[in-house]
Amino acid sequence: MDISSLLGILGALGMVVMSILTSGGSIMSVVDLPSFLMVAVGSYFALMLSASLSEALGIWSLFGRTFQIPVFNEQNIIQKMMAFSEKARREGLLALEDELEDLDDEFMKKGLRLVVDGADVEVIRNLMELELSQMQGRHADKIGLVTMWAALAPGLGMLGTVVGLISMLKNLDDKASIGPNMALALVTTFYGSLLANLIMIPISGKLRSHDARESQVKEMVIEGVLSIQAGDNTRILAMKLLAYLNPTDRRALEAQLLKD
């Protein structure tokens, strides 16, 4: 589980609750079921208007990914690439064919299959970059849904406030109820801001960081496949791929792989 996501949402909600309590209010003062339904459920149905039913239903799985740490095994990829490079330089590119069946990375397998089949370097690059761009496009569409919900929630909150104000203004004869009714009308704005700024916008940011990291790993695989196809020295290949790691992981793996 991604502890930062859990701490983030619990900490943010905790600060909101603390601010309510320390300002003399109570939690029940911001609890109103009709307001919540208008903002949360209303904005979700509005989201369906901008997306297909399957996309709108699929957005819930995205929230689950926010609390998961994606594992891409960059170090394992580098070690496998080095092993493939050594074998290709020693026995030829065709010798890699037997190794491909054991690969669990489909992206790497497709690239190396093209290498074994003798495809041109530009063909390999174009096909692998095409698959990468299509993945990024799919991710962008899903992240866009979360961003759209973040934009809709405050609008529904303001709409709920307007509805509450209209009802209040129609009953101005009861002056004692004006204050409580005004406070209740503003609750929907509170829910809209809470949903957008504490949940949707941070989630879209976390998903963007996951997309950026996965894209970087696939770029590293492309670099490794093309380096093997070009017959680069294994040490040079390792130095190229290590450049994709963060400094801490790079130093640790560099000491292990390039010690000779």
Image (cartoon, helix red, strand yellow):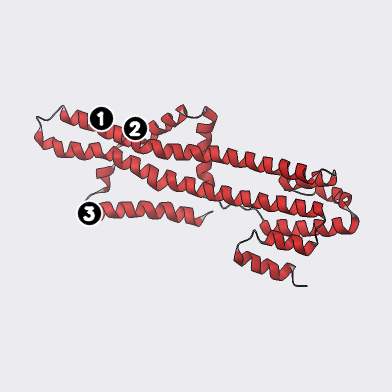
199 vs 155, nearest the viewer: 155
Quarter of the figure with the C terminus: bottom right
Where in the figure is residue 166, as x and y percent of width and height?
Answer: 21, 29
Name the outermost residue toward the front. Answer: 122
* Count of numbered circles on the image: 3
The reply to whether the C-beta atoms of the residues labelled 2 and 1 are less than 8 Å apart is: yes
Label 3: element kind: loop
Among the 4 quarters of the image, the one containing residue 15: bottom left
Q: Label 2 belongs to which residue? A: 38
Image point 19% across, 38% down: which residue? Answer: 182
Q: Disc 3 designates what residue?
A: 23
- Nearest the eye: 156 or 111: 111
Mark 2 residue element? helix
Question: Residue at point 76% right, 51% down?
Answer: 226
- Is tag 2's residue or tag 1's residue first in the polypeptide sequence? 2
Marks 2 & 3, CB-CB < 8 Å contact? no
Secondary structure category for the residue under label 1:
helix
Q: CA distance from mark 2 to mark 3?
A: 26 Å
Q: Residues within 10 Å of mark 2 (few under 14, many from 20)?
A: some
Q: Give the residue type at disc 1.
A: Val
**Percent coordinates x, y for residue 158 in the rendering:** 30, 35
Q: Nearer the viewer, mark 2 or mark 1?
A: 1
Say whether residue 74 is left or right of residue 118: left
Circles 1 and 3, Cβ within 8 Å, touching? The answer is no
Disc number for residue 163: 1
Which is more foreground, mark 1 or mark 3?
A: 1
- Residue 12: x, y in percent? 38, 53
In the image, taking residue 54 as reference, residue 230 lies left or right, namely: right
Q: Amino acid under label 2?
A: Met
The reply to whether residue 101 is visible in this rendering is no
